[in-house]
């Protein structure tokens, strides 16, 4: 199997999303560059003993140090203050080796933006890398404007709705997720995973045994069509949404045109496990979002470059699973 040009060096979880973007199956994809992103790749690369892995670890460490060393201060939360800080942050993020690497490898439009969010009475920021096909990307300032206005106005739903459309999520699911004022007893996250909860071995999450496989944690998940509704890592479908299921099946079949079925199935399993874990964390202060490896061995493997993962026995070209 030939890896699509520009995707072999991307982390596997991001490379599969990027392939859907390049095929026109999704408008865009993105990834947040945070501690989890850097920690996951560092831990996965420790399993490799080759010069390229050493260089990759060095570049990731430099990027992490740059990201964690940035300090942002502003006297008041105004559009002017956030625009000024955003321009400074964007320039700093551009200089990170990881951002330069993603931009150089992805054969489309790639850019990094700061992302603002109000949390606990204060404004926090992150860094998000966006991937689009050439000619289909919005202007970076358009995304920044939507984010800044929502942050200043205290209307996070407005930016969540905008981001959902950038990522090609079904409109009905976007509205179900952002409208949290209908007196529902369950959060949108919990409502989304309720239909597949009995097919997730929640007692074994987070996984602590390094030999645990993602299919051990979700042993019967593909016995329900609802599994296909979880077609993106940060997407929570409306409960029983037929549109989400149809979209997921189409994306699944698109991925099968270029990748082994075991890899595609693991990608969906990981998205489901991630959504299930995040949903539980949203209602339980004692729980946290899944750290790399918390969803089984494949969770960590998917931080490795796609070209490396396709050479592993589990993802042989003939599609035969090996344990």
Image (cartoon, helix red, strand yellow):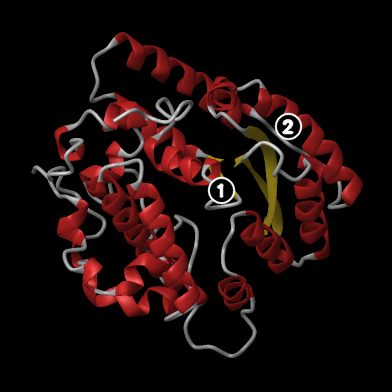
* Residue 37 at x, y percent in the picture: 45, 38
User: 136 above or below 100?
Assistant: below
Could you tell me which residue is drawn at 47 percent across and 70 percent down? 244
Could you tell me which residue is drawn at 67 percent across and 34 percent down? 111
One can see residue 289 in this view: no
Residue placed furthest toward the top: 51
Name the residue tied to disc 1: 24
Q: Earlier in the sequence, mark 1 or mark 2?
A: 1
Q: Secondary structure at mark 2?
A: helix
Where on the picture, by quarter, is residue 171? bottom right
Residue 90 - label: 2
One can see residue 230 in this view: yes
Is 191 on the left-hand or right-hand side of 314?
right
For marks 1 and 2, give the one nearer the viewer.
1
User: 100 above or below 16?
Assistant: above
Residue placed furthest toward the right: 80
Residue placed furthest toward the front: 257
Is 89 on the left-hand or right-hand side of 287?
right
Q: How many marks?
A: 2
User: 41 above or below 202?
Assistant: above
- Choose between 197 and 2: the one closer to the eye: 2
Residue placed furthest toward the left: 323
Q: Secondary structure at mark 1?
A: loop
* Residue 63 at x, y percent in the picture: 54, 24
Could you tell me which residue is drawn at 40 percent across and 12 percent down? 55
């Amino acid at each position: 199997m030939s890896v699509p040009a520009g995707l072999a060096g991307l982390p596997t979880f991001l490379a599969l999303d990027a392939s859907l973007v390049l095929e026109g199956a999704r408008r865009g994809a993105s990834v947040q560059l945070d501690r989890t992103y850097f920690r996951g790749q560092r831990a996965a690369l420790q399993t490799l003993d080759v010069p390229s892995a050493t260089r990759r670890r060095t570049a990731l460490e430099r990027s992490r140090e740059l990201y964690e060393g940035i300090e942002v201060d502003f006297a008041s939360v105004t559009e002017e203050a956030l625009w000024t800080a955003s321009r400074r942050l964007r320039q700093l993020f551009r200089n990170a080796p990881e951002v330069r690497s993603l931009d150089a490898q992805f054969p489309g439009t790639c850019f990094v933006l700061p992302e603002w969010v109000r949390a606990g009475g204060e404004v926090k920021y992150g860094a998000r890398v966006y991937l689009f096909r050439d000619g289909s990307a919005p202007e970076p300032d358009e995304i920044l404007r939507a984010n800044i206005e929502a942050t200043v106005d205290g209307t996070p739903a407005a930016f969540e709705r905008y981001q959902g459309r950038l990522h090609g999520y079904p409109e009905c699911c976007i509205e179900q997720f952002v409208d949290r004022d209908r007196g529902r007893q369950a959060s949108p996250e919990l409502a989304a995973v309720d239909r597949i909860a009995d097919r997730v071995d929640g007692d074994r999450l987070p996984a602590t045994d390094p030999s645990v496989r993602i299919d051990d944690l979700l042993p019967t998940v593909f016995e329900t069509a609802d599994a296909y509704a979880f077609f993106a890592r940060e997407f929570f479908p409306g409960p029983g949404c037929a549109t989400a299921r149809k979209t997921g099946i189409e994306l699944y079949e698109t991925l099968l045109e270029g990748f082994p079925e075991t890899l595609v199935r693991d990608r969906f399993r990981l998205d489901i496990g991630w959504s299930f874990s995040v949903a539980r964390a949203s209602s339980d202060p004692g729980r946290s979002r899944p750290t790399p490896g918390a969803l089984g061995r494949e969770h960590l493997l998917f931080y490795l470059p796609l070209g490396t993962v396709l050479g592993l026995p589990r993802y042989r070209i003939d599609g035969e699973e090996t344990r």
